[in-house]
Image (spheres, grey):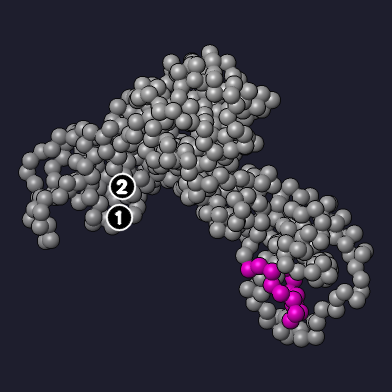
Amino acid sequence: MKPIAASTPLALWLDPEKSLSPEHSQALNSSGWALMPIHTLDALLSQASDAALVVLHLGADMSRLQAVQQLLQDAGLNTPVVARVDRHELEMAVEASRCGAVAVLASDDVRPASWLRLHNHISPKQTRPTAQPVRNVVFVDPASQHLLALAQKVAQADVTALLVGPTGSGKEVLARVLHEASARAHGPFVALNCAAMPENLIEDMLFGHEKGAFTGAHRDQKGLFEQAQGGTLFLDEIGEMPMHLQSKLLRVLQERQLTRLGGQSVILLNVRIVAATNKDLKAAIAAREFREDLYYRIATFRMRLLPLAERPGDIIPLAMQCLLQHDKKPWQLHPQAQMQLLQYPWPGNVRELENVMRRAMVLCSDHLITPAHLMFDDWLTTCAPTPAPMAMPAATPVLAQMPIHVPTNVTPTALEDFMQSTLQKLDPQDHAPLNNADSAADSQRTDLHSAVRMNEHQVIMATLATTPSKTEAAKRLGISPRTLRYKLAQLREHGLGMASAAC
Protein backbone atom coordinates (compact mmCIF):
# COMPACT_ATOMS: atom_id res chain seq x y z
CA MET A 1 0.00 0.00 0.00
CA LYS A 2 1.37 3.39 -0.97
CA PRO A 3 2.10 5.95 1.78
CA ILE A 4 -0.81 8.15 2.81
CA ALA A 5 -0.39 11.89 2.53
CA ALA A 6 -0.62 13.73 5.82
CA SER A 7 -3.44 15.94 4.50
CA THR A 8 -5.52 13.02 3.21
CA PRO A 9 -8.06 11.75 5.78
CA LEU A 10 -7.99 7.99 6.36
CA ALA A 11 -11.16 5.90 6.12
CA LEU A 12 -11.11 2.42 7.65
CA TRP A 13 -13.28 0.06 5.60
CA LEU A 14 -14.57 -2.67 7.95
CA ASP A 15 -16.43 -5.52 6.28
CA PRO A 16 -15.91 -9.03 7.73
CA GLU A 17 -17.90 -10.72 4.93
CA LYS A 18 -16.72 -9.17 1.68
CA SER A 19 -13.53 -7.75 0.24
CA LEU A 20 -13.33 -4.13 -0.86
CA SER A 21 -14.62 -3.81 -4.41
CA PRO A 22 -12.67 -1.84 -7.04
CA GLU A 23 -15.72 0.38 -7.58
CA HIS A 24 -15.87 1.40 -3.91
CA SER A 25 -12.12 1.94 -3.79
CA GLN A 26 -12.22 4.22 -6.81
CA ALA A 27 -15.24 6.18 -5.45
CA LEU A 28 -13.55 6.93 -2.11
CA ASN A 29 -10.15 7.72 -3.62
CA SER A 30 -11.65 10.10 -6.14
CA SER A 31 -13.58 11.91 -3.38
CA GLY A 32 -10.46 12.58 -1.30
CA TRP A 33 -10.28 9.62 1.07
CA ALA A 34 -7.31 7.40 1.77
CA LEU A 35 -8.72 3.91 2.17
CA MET A 36 -7.59 1.00 4.35
CA PRO A 37 -9.62 -2.23 4.30
CA ILE A 38 -9.77 -4.19 7.60
CA HIS A 39 -11.73 -7.25 8.67
CA THR A 40 -11.52 -7.49 12.47
CA LEU A 41 -12.03 -5.34 15.56
CA ASP A 42 -8.40 -5.91 16.56
CA ALA A 43 -7.29 -4.35 13.27
CA LEU A 44 -9.69 -1.47 13.88
CA LEU A 45 -8.24 -0.85 17.33
CA SER A 46 -4.67 -0.76 16.00
CA GLN A 47 -5.51 1.80 13.29
CA ALA A 48 -8.32 3.82 14.91
CA SER A 49 -6.12 6.61 16.28
CA ASP A 50 -5.08 7.59 12.73
CA ALA A 51 -8.52 7.32 11.13
CA ALA A 52 -10.93 10.14 10.35
CA LEU A 53 -13.79 7.78 9.49
CA VAL A 54 -14.91 4.18 9.96
CA VAL A 55 -17.06 2.70 7.20
CA LEU A 56 -18.88 -0.32 8.62
CA HIS A 57 -20.99 -2.93 6.86
CA LEU A 58 -23.70 -3.88 9.37
CA GLY A 59 -24.57 -7.34 8.07
CA ALA A 60 -27.53 -9.02 9.77
CA ASP A 61 -27.82 -7.15 13.09
CA MET A 62 -26.98 -3.98 15.01
CA SER A 63 -24.53 -5.53 17.47
CA ARG A 64 -21.62 -4.85 15.13
CA LEU A 65 -22.25 -1.08 15.21
CA GLN A 66 -22.51 -1.11 19.00
CA ALA A 67 -19.26 -3.09 19.30
CA VAL A 68 -17.39 -0.59 17.10
CA GLN A 69 -18.79 2.41 18.98
CA GLN A 70 -17.84 0.89 22.34
CA LEU A 71 -14.32 0.09 21.15
CA LEU A 72 -13.79 3.67 19.92
CA GLN A 73 -15.19 5.13 23.13
CA ASP A 74 -12.91 2.98 25.30
CA ALA A 75 -9.96 4.19 23.22
CA GLY A 76 -10.89 7.83 23.98
CA LEU A 77 -11.97 8.53 20.39
CA ASN A 78 -15.22 9.78 18.92
CA THR A 79 -14.36 8.77 15.35
CA PRO A 80 -17.52 9.05 13.22
CA VAL A 81 -18.98 5.81 11.86
CA VAL A 82 -20.74 5.46 8.52
CA ALA A 83 -23.07 2.46 8.31
CA ARG A 84 -23.50 0.49 5.09
CA VAL A 85 -26.76 -1.47 4.90
CA ASP A 86 -28.49 -3.46 2.19
CA ARG A 87 -31.11 -1.48 0.30
CA HIS A 88 -34.02 -3.63 1.49
CA GLU A 89 -33.07 -3.21 5.19
CA LEU A 90 -34.99 0.01 5.81
CA GLU A 91 -35.60 -0.66 9.51
CA MET A 92 -31.92 -1.34 10.09
CA ALA A 93 -31.00 1.92 8.38
CA VAL A 94 -33.32 3.86 10.68
CA GLU A 95 -31.98 2.05 13.76
CA ALA A 96 -28.36 2.70 12.72
CA SER A 97 -29.03 6.41 12.41
CA ARG A 98 -30.76 6.40 15.79
CA CYS A 99 -27.83 4.59 17.41
CA GLY A 100 -25.27 7.19 16.39
CA ALA A 101 -24.10 6.54 12.82
CA VAL A 102 -23.25 9.90 11.21
CA ALA A 103 -24.54 8.66 7.87
CA VAL A 104 -26.21 5.55 6.44
CA LEU A 105 -25.46 4.52 2.86
CA ALA A 106 -26.59 1.62 0.72
CA SER A 107 -24.01 -1.14 0.67
CA ASP A 108 -23.79 -0.92 -3.15
CA ASP A 109 -23.51 2.90 -3.33
CA VAL A 110 -20.40 3.63 -5.41
CA ARG A 111 -21.21 7.24 -6.30
CA PRO A 112 -18.25 9.55 -5.56
CA ALA A 113 -20.70 12.34 -4.65
CA SER A 114 -21.93 10.36 -1.62
CA TRP A 115 -18.42 10.02 -0.23
CA LEU A 116 -17.46 13.57 -1.16
CA ARG A 117 -20.28 14.91 1.04
CA LEU A 118 -18.81 12.97 3.96
CA HIS A 119 -15.34 14.34 3.21
CA ASN A 120 -16.64 17.91 3.34
CA HIS A 121 -18.77 17.33 6.43
CA ILE A 122 -16.36 15.49 8.74
CA SER A 123 -13.56 17.47 10.36
CA PRO A 124 -10.32 15.72 11.32
CA LYS A 125 -10.62 17.42 14.73
CA GLN A 126 -13.50 15.12 15.54
CA THR A 127 -11.19 12.13 15.83
CA ARG A 128 -8.70 13.56 18.28
CA PRO A 129 -8.68 11.92 21.72
CA THR A 130 -10.78 13.86 24.20
CA ALA A 131 -10.25 14.15 27.90
CA GLN A 132 -13.91 13.35 28.47
CA PRO A 133 -15.31 10.93 25.83
CA VAL A 134 -18.92 11.23 24.79
CA ARG A 135 -21.00 9.13 27.15
CA ASN A 136 -22.67 6.13 25.52
CA VAL A 137 -26.22 6.31 26.88
CA VAL A 138 -29.36 4.51 25.75
CA PHE A 139 -32.48 6.57 25.07
CA VAL A 140 -34.32 4.55 22.41
CA ASP A 141 -37.87 4.27 23.73
CA PRO A 142 -40.05 7.26 22.73
CA ALA A 143 -40.57 8.18 26.39
CA SER A 144 -36.80 8.10 26.96
CA GLN A 145 -36.13 10.19 23.87
CA HIS A 146 -38.60 12.80 25.12
CA LEU A 147 -36.82 12.82 28.49
CA LEU A 148 -33.42 13.17 26.80
CA ALA A 149 -34.61 16.11 24.71
CA LEU A 150 -35.98 17.74 27.84
CA ALA A 151 -32.73 17.14 29.74
CA GLN A 152 -30.68 18.74 26.96
CA LYS A 153 -32.85 21.86 27.15
CA VAL A 154 -32.67 22.00 30.94
CA ALA A 155 -28.89 21.55 30.77
CA GLN A 156 -28.53 24.87 28.94
CA ALA A 157 -30.21 26.74 31.80
CA ASP A 158 -28.15 26.97 34.99
CA VAL A 159 -30.96 25.84 37.32
CA THR A 160 -31.23 23.13 39.94
CA ALA A 161 -32.91 19.91 38.86
CA LEU A 162 -34.66 17.13 40.78
CA LEU A 163 -34.66 13.65 39.25
CA VAL A 164 -37.40 11.35 40.51
CA GLY A 165 -37.60 7.64 39.78
CA PRO A 166 -37.36 4.14 41.25
CA THR A 167 -34.07 2.66 42.38
CA GLY A 168 -31.92 1.48 39.52
CA SER A 169 -33.75 3.45 36.82
CA GLY A 170 -30.70 5.49 35.78
CA LYS A 171 -30.93 8.75 37.72
CA GLU A 172 -27.17 9.20 37.91
CA VAL A 173 -26.86 8.55 34.17
CA LEU A 174 -29.36 11.34 33.51
CA ALA A 175 -27.53 13.61 35.96
CA ARG A 176 -24.33 13.09 33.97
CA VAL A 177 -26.22 13.89 30.77
CA LEU A 178 -27.33 17.19 32.35
CA HIS A 179 -23.72 17.92 33.27
CA GLU A 180 -22.14 16.93 29.95
CA ALA A 181 -24.73 18.81 27.87
CA SER A 182 -24.23 22.03 29.84
CA ALA A 183 -21.68 24.80 29.77
CA ARG A 184 -20.13 23.18 32.86
CA ALA A 185 -19.13 20.04 30.93
CA HIS A 186 -15.41 20.78 31.36
CA GLY A 187 -15.83 21.18 35.11
CA PRO A 188 -15.95 18.34 37.66
CA PHE A 189 -18.93 16.08 38.26
CA VAL A 190 -19.03 15.19 41.97
CA ALA A 191 -21.57 12.73 43.41
CA LEU A 192 -22.68 11.97 46.97
CA ASN A 193 -25.14 9.29 48.04
CA CYS A 194 -26.85 10.85 51.05
CA ALA A 195 -28.13 7.46 52.23
CA ALA A 196 -24.75 5.75 52.15
CA MET A 197 -22.86 8.04 54.53
CA PRO A 198 -23.17 8.10 58.34
CA GLU A 199 -25.09 11.15 59.55
CA ASN A 200 -22.12 12.61 61.41
CA LEU A 201 -19.93 12.51 58.28
CA ILE A 202 -22.24 14.02 55.67
CA GLU A 203 -21.82 17.58 56.95
CA ASP A 204 -18.03 17.28 56.82
CA MET A 205 -18.21 15.65 53.38
CA LEU A 206 -20.36 18.46 52.00
CA PHE A 207 -18.86 21.56 53.60
CA GLY A 208 -15.30 20.54 54.55
CA HIS A 209 -13.37 21.56 57.65
CA GLU A 210 -10.38 23.58 58.80
CA LYS A 211 -7.37 22.11 60.56
CA GLY A 212 -8.14 21.64 64.26
CA ALA A 213 -11.92 21.91 63.82
CA PHE A 214 -12.34 18.64 65.75
CA THR A 215 -10.28 15.79 67.11
CA GLY A 216 -8.47 14.16 64.21
CA ALA A 217 -8.71 17.17 61.87
CA HIS A 218 -4.98 17.36 61.15
CA ARG A 219 -5.26 19.39 57.94
CA ASP A 220 -7.67 21.52 55.95
CA GLN A 221 -10.20 19.50 53.97
CA LYS A 222 -12.25 20.76 51.04
CA GLY A 223 -15.88 19.65 51.01
CA LEU A 224 -17.75 18.36 47.96
CA PHE A 225 -19.16 21.82 47.24
CA GLU A 226 -15.64 23.18 46.82
CA GLN A 227 -14.51 20.12 44.88
CA ALA A 228 -17.38 20.70 42.43
CA GLN A 229 -16.50 24.38 41.80
CA GLY A 230 -17.28 25.23 38.17
CA GLY A 231 -19.11 21.93 37.71
CA THR A 232 -22.01 19.89 39.02
CA LEU A 233 -22.74 18.43 42.47
CA PHE A 234 -25.07 15.40 42.34
CA LEU A 235 -26.90 14.65 45.60
CA ASP A 236 -28.38 11.17 45.24
CA GLU A 237 -31.12 9.95 47.60
CA ILE A 238 -31.55 13.45 49.00
CA GLY A 239 -34.77 12.35 50.68
CA GLU A 240 -32.64 10.45 53.20
CA MET A 241 -30.72 13.54 54.35
CA PRO A 242 -31.16 14.29 58.09
CA MET A 243 -33.38 17.27 58.91
CA HIS A 244 -30.70 19.37 60.63
CA LEU A 245 -28.49 19.11 57.52
CA GLN A 246 -31.37 20.04 55.26
CA SER A 247 -31.49 23.50 56.86
CA LYS A 248 -27.74 23.99 56.37
CA LEU A 249 -27.98 22.83 52.76
CA LEU A 250 -30.86 25.23 52.14
CA ARG A 251 -28.81 28.16 53.46
CA VAL A 252 -25.86 27.29 51.20
CA LEU A 253 -28.12 27.01 48.15
CA GLN A 254 -29.77 30.35 48.91
CA GLU A 255 -26.61 32.32 49.60
CA ARG A 256 -24.28 30.54 47.18
CA GLN A 257 -21.54 30.55 49.78
CA LEU A 258 -20.36 28.46 52.73
CA THR A 259 -18.02 28.43 55.69
CA ARG A 260 -16.05 25.30 56.50
CA LEU A 261 -16.46 23.62 59.86
CA GLY A 262 -14.20 25.43 62.31
CA GLY A 263 -13.46 28.16 59.78
CA GLN A 264 -14.08 31.89 59.59
CA SER A 265 -13.66 32.81 55.92
CA VAL A 266 -16.58 32.73 53.50
CA ILE A 267 -16.15 30.69 50.30
CA LEU A 268 -18.17 31.77 47.27
CA LEU A 269 -19.64 28.91 45.25
CA ASN A 270 -20.16 28.39 41.53
CA VAL A 271 -21.83 24.97 41.54
CA ARG A 272 -24.90 23.52 39.90
CA ILE A 273 -27.00 21.20 42.07
CA VAL A 274 -28.73 18.12 40.66
CA ALA A 275 -30.61 16.06 43.25
CA ALA A 276 -32.30 12.68 42.96
CA THR A 277 -34.67 10.59 45.03
CA ASN A 278 -36.83 7.48 44.86
CA LYS A 279 -39.12 8.78 47.62
CA ASP A 280 -42.31 10.80 47.36
CA LEU A 281 -40.97 14.06 48.76
CA LYS A 282 -44.46 15.59 48.98
CA ALA A 283 -45.45 12.74 51.31
CA ALA A 284 -42.19 13.22 53.22
CA ILE A 285 -43.04 16.91 53.64
CA ALA A 286 -46.47 16.00 55.04
CA ALA A 287 -44.79 13.57 57.45
CA ARG A 288 -42.34 16.31 58.51
CA GLU A 289 -39.39 14.30 57.20
CA PHE A 290 -38.35 16.79 54.51
CA ARG A 291 -38.30 20.58 54.45
CA GLU A 292 -40.81 22.15 52.09
CA ASP A 293 -38.60 25.19 51.43
CA LEU A 294 -35.69 22.92 50.49
CA TYR A 295 -37.94 20.97 48.13
CA TYR A 296 -38.87 24.06 46.16
CA ARG A 297 -35.22 25.16 46.14
CA ILE A 298 -33.95 21.92 44.54
CA ALA A 299 -36.98 21.26 42.31
CA THR A 300 -36.67 24.24 39.99
CA PHE A 301 -37.02 21.67 37.24
CA ARG A 302 -38.41 18.23 38.09
CA MET A 303 -37.88 15.25 35.76
CA ARG A 304 -39.32 11.77 36.28
CA LEU A 305 -37.61 8.60 35.09
CA LEU A 306 -39.96 5.73 34.26
CA PRO A 307 -39.37 2.18 35.49
CA LEU A 308 -37.65 0.02 32.88
CA ALA A 309 -40.82 -2.04 32.30
CA GLU A 310 -42.62 1.14 31.15
CA ARG A 311 -40.01 1.96 28.49
CA PRO A 312 -39.59 -1.40 26.70
CA GLY A 313 -37.79 0.17 23.77
CA ASP A 314 -34.71 0.61 25.97
CA ILE A 315 -34.50 -3.02 27.19
CA ILE A 316 -32.76 -4.71 24.25
CA PRO A 317 -30.32 -1.81 23.56
CA LEU A 318 -29.42 -1.70 27.27
CA ALA A 319 -28.87 -5.45 27.27
CA MET A 320 -26.56 -5.20 24.25
CA GLN A 321 -24.70 -2.27 25.81
CA CYS A 322 -24.09 -4.34 28.95
CA LEU A 323 -22.72 -7.23 26.89
CA LEU A 324 -20.38 -5.01 24.91
CA GLN A 325 -19.12 -3.16 27.99
CA HIS A 326 -17.59 -6.36 29.35
CA ASP A 327 -16.59 -8.10 26.12
CA LYS A 328 -15.68 -6.31 22.90
CA LYS A 329 -16.53 -9.31 20.71
CA PRO A 330 -19.91 -9.10 18.92
CA TRP A 331 -22.78 -10.63 20.90
CA GLN A 332 -26.18 -11.75 19.66
CA LEU A 333 -29.52 -12.17 21.43
CA HIS A 334 -31.74 -15.03 20.28
CA PRO A 335 -35.27 -13.79 19.36
CA GLN A 336 -36.80 -15.92 22.11
CA ALA A 337 -34.31 -14.45 24.61
CA GLN A 338 -35.31 -10.96 23.46
CA MET A 339 -38.96 -11.89 23.98
CA GLN A 340 -38.23 -12.99 27.53
CA LEU A 341 -36.36 -9.79 28.30
CA LEU A 342 -39.26 -7.73 26.97
CA GLN A 343 -41.91 -9.65 28.95
CA TYR A 344 -40.11 -9.73 32.31
CA PRO A 345 -41.41 -7.00 34.72
CA TRP A 346 -37.91 -5.82 35.85
CA PRO A 347 -38.60 -4.89 39.48
CA GLY A 348 -34.90 -4.04 39.85
CA ASN A 349 -34.88 -1.88 36.69
CA VAL A 350 -31.59 -1.32 34.85
CA ARG A 351 -29.42 -2.72 37.65
CA GLU A 352 -31.30 -6.01 37.53
CA LEU A 353 -30.99 -6.12 33.73
CA GLU A 354 -27.22 -5.70 34.08
CA ASN A 355 -27.12 -8.59 36.55
CA VAL A 356 -29.13 -10.85 34.23
CA MET A 357 -26.84 -10.11 31.29
CA ARG A 358 -23.68 -10.69 33.34
CA ARG A 359 -25.03 -14.09 34.38
CA ALA A 360 -25.83 -14.87 30.75
CA MET A 361 -22.24 -14.03 29.76
CA VAL A 362 -20.97 -16.49 32.37
CA LEU A 363 -23.22 -19.27 31.10
CA CYS A 364 -22.83 -18.61 27.36
CA SER A 365 -19.77 -19.89 25.50
CA ASP A 366 -20.57 -18.97 21.88
CA HIS A 367 -21.66 -15.28 22.17
CA LEU A 368 -25.29 -16.18 21.34
CA ILE A 369 -27.57 -15.56 24.32
CA THR A 370 -30.54 -17.98 24.34
CA PRO A 371 -33.40 -18.40 26.83
CA ALA A 372 -31.40 -21.11 28.59
CA HIS A 373 -28.80 -18.49 29.61
CA LEU A 374 -31.25 -16.05 31.24
CA MET A 375 -31.54 -16.25 35.02
CA PHE A 376 -34.01 -13.80 36.55
CA ASP A 377 -33.97 -12.79 40.21
CA ASP A 378 -37.70 -13.47 40.71
CA TRP A 379 -37.99 -16.54 38.47
CA LEU A 380 -39.19 -18.87 41.25
CA THR A 381 -41.56 -16.56 43.12
CA THR A 382 -43.21 -15.09 40.03
CA CYS A 383 -43.32 -18.07 37.71
CA ALA A 384 -42.91 -21.47 39.27
CA PRO A 385 -45.58 -22.96 41.57
CA THR A 386 -44.55 -25.16 44.47
CA PRO A 387 -44.61 -28.74 43.18
CA ALA A 388 -46.07 -31.67 45.07
CA PRO A 389 -43.49 -33.70 47.04
CA MET A 390 -41.87 -36.22 44.73
CA ALA A 391 -39.30 -38.92 45.29
CA MET A 392 -36.31 -38.84 42.92
CA PRO A 393 -34.83 -42.21 41.86
CA ALA A 394 -31.26 -42.70 42.99
CA ALA A 395 -30.10 -43.26 39.41
CA THR A 396 -31.58 -39.98 38.11
CA PRO A 397 -28.89 -37.31 37.57
CA VAL A 398 -29.56 -33.67 38.38
CA LEU A 399 -29.21 -31.86 35.06
CA ALA A 400 -28.64 -28.38 36.48
CA GLN A 401 -28.80 -26.58 39.78
CA MET A 402 -29.52 -23.12 38.51
CA PRO A 403 -32.89 -21.59 37.57
CA ILE A 404 -33.58 -21.31 33.84
CA HIS A 405 -36.62 -19.26 32.87
CA VAL A 406 -38.87 -21.02 30.36
CA PRO A 407 -39.61 -19.03 27.16
CA THR A 408 -42.90 -17.20 27.57
CA ASN A 409 -43.87 -17.39 23.91
CA VAL A 410 -44.30 -21.17 24.09
CA THR A 411 -48.03 -21.67 24.66
CA PRO A 412 -49.41 -24.10 27.26
CA THR A 413 -51.49 -25.79 24.54
CA ALA A 414 -48.40 -26.55 22.46
CA LEU A 415 -46.60 -27.99 25.46
CA GLU A 416 -49.68 -30.02 26.41
CA ASP A 417 -49.85 -31.52 22.91
CA PHE A 418 -46.16 -32.32 22.96
CA MET A 419 -46.37 -34.01 26.37
CA GLN A 420 -49.44 -35.98 25.34
CA SER A 421 -47.82 -37.27 22.14
CA THR A 422 -44.68 -38.16 24.04
CA LEU A 423 -46.56 -40.12 26.69
CA GLN A 424 -48.43 -42.09 24.03
CA LYS A 425 -45.10 -43.27 22.58
CA LEU A 426 -43.56 -44.30 25.88
CA ASP A 427 -42.38 -47.87 26.21
CA PRO A 428 -43.40 -49.31 29.59
CA GLN A 429 -40.00 -51.00 29.79
CA ASP A 430 -38.15 -47.71 29.45
CA HIS A 431 -38.69 -46.71 33.04
CA ALA A 432 -39.49 -48.09 36.46
CA PRO A 433 -42.33 -46.81 38.67
CA LEU A 434 -41.55 -44.19 41.25
CA ASN A 435 -40.64 -45.40 44.68
CA ASN A 436 -43.18 -43.88 47.07
CA ALA A 437 -42.81 -46.49 49.83
CA ASP A 438 -41.12 -44.23 52.31
CA SER A 439 -43.89 -41.66 52.85
CA ALA A 440 -42.30 -40.38 56.05
CA ALA A 441 -39.17 -39.35 54.16
CA ASP A 442 -41.30 -37.65 51.50
CA SER A 443 -43.14 -35.59 54.11
CA GLN A 444 -39.82 -34.36 55.51
CA ARG A 445 -38.35 -33.43 52.15
CA THR A 446 -36.87 -29.90 52.31
CA ASP A 447 -37.54 -26.90 50.11
CA LEU A 448 -34.07 -27.37 48.64
CA HIS A 449 -35.11 -30.69 47.12
CA SER A 450 -38.22 -29.08 45.67
CA ALA A 451 -36.10 -26.31 44.17
CA VAL A 452 -33.71 -28.85 42.61
CA ARG A 453 -36.65 -30.71 41.05
CA MET A 454 -38.08 -27.47 39.75
CA ASN A 455 -34.69 -26.45 38.30
CA GLU A 456 -34.43 -29.77 36.48
CA HIS A 457 -37.93 -29.27 35.12
CA GLN A 458 -37.10 -25.74 33.93
CA VAL A 459 -33.98 -26.95 32.15
CA ILE A 460 -35.85 -29.73 30.35
CA MET A 461 -38.73 -27.51 29.23
CA ALA A 462 -36.42 -24.69 28.10
CA THR A 463 -34.32 -27.13 26.06
CA LEU A 464 -37.40 -28.72 24.45
CA ALA A 465 -38.65 -25.27 23.47
CA THR A 466 -35.39 -24.35 21.71
CA THR A 467 -34.59 -27.62 19.89
CA PRO A 468 -36.26 -29.14 16.83
CA SER A 469 -36.60 -32.68 18.26
CA LYS A 470 -36.46 -34.58 21.53
CA THR A 471 -33.39 -36.43 20.26
CA GLU A 472 -31.53 -33.15 19.87
CA ALA A 473 -32.87 -32.00 23.25
CA ALA A 474 -31.53 -35.14 24.93
CA LYS A 475 -28.15 -34.58 23.27
CA ARG A 476 -27.96 -31.00 24.61
CA LEU A 477 -28.99 -32.17 28.06
CA GLY A 478 -26.30 -34.85 28.08
CA ILE A 479 -28.72 -37.75 28.59
CA SER A 480 -30.16 -40.52 26.43
CA PRO A 481 -33.54 -40.17 24.68
CA ARG A 482 -34.85 -42.98 26.91
CA THR A 483 -33.91 -41.04 30.05
CA LEU A 484 -35.60 -37.94 28.64
CA ARG A 485 -38.81 -39.88 28.02
CA TYR A 486 -38.64 -41.23 31.55
CA LYS A 487 -38.26 -37.75 33.04
CA LEU A 488 -41.16 -36.40 30.97
CA ALA A 489 -43.35 -39.18 32.35
CA GLN A 490 -42.27 -38.23 35.88
CA LEU A 491 -43.11 -34.59 35.32
CA ARG A 492 -46.52 -35.49 33.94
CA GLU A 493 -47.35 -37.87 36.78
CA HIS A 494 -46.49 -35.34 39.46
CA GLY A 495 -48.30 -32.36 38.02
CA LEU A 496 -45.28 -30.45 36.68
CA GLY A 497 -46.16 -30.72 33.02
CA MET A 498 -47.99 -27.52 32.26
CA ALA A 499 -48.42 -25.05 35.09
CA SER A 500 -44.89 -23.72 35.47
CA ALA A 501 -44.20 -23.86 31.76
CA ALA A 502 -47.04 -21.46 31.09
CA CYS A 503 -45.51 -18.59 33.12
| First to last magenta residue range | 386-401
Give the residue at x 28% y 48%.
243
User: Is 415 left or right of 421, judged from the image as shown?
Assistant: left
Q: Which mark is residue 197?
A: 1
Name the main secondary structure of what is drawn in magenta. Answer: loop
Mark 1 residue type: Met
Neighbour tally class for label 1: few under 14, some 14-19, many 20 plus, Cα within 10 Å = few
The answer to which image quadrant residue 109 occupies is top right
Relative to the observer, which residue lies in front, 76 or 226? 76
CA–CA distance in space, label 1 to label 2? 9 Å
User: Is 258 left or right of 333, judged from the image as shown?
Assistant: left
Where residue 240 sits: x, y (%)?
35, 50
Give the residue at x 51% y 18%.
115
Neighbour tally class for label 2: few under 14, some 14-19, many 20 plus, Cα within 10 Å = some
Where residue 101 sits: x, y (%)?
51, 28
Q: Earlier in the sequence, mark 1 or mark 2?
A: 2
Q: Is residue 315 above or below residue 372?
A: above
Mark 2 residue type: Leu
Q: Under tag 1, what secondary structure?
A: loop
Q: Under tag 2, what secondary structure?
A: strand
Give the residue at x 48% y 40%.
43
Disc 2 target residue: 192
Relative to the observer, which residue lies in front, 51 or 358? 51
User: Is 353 left or right of 392, judged from the image as shown?
Assistant: left
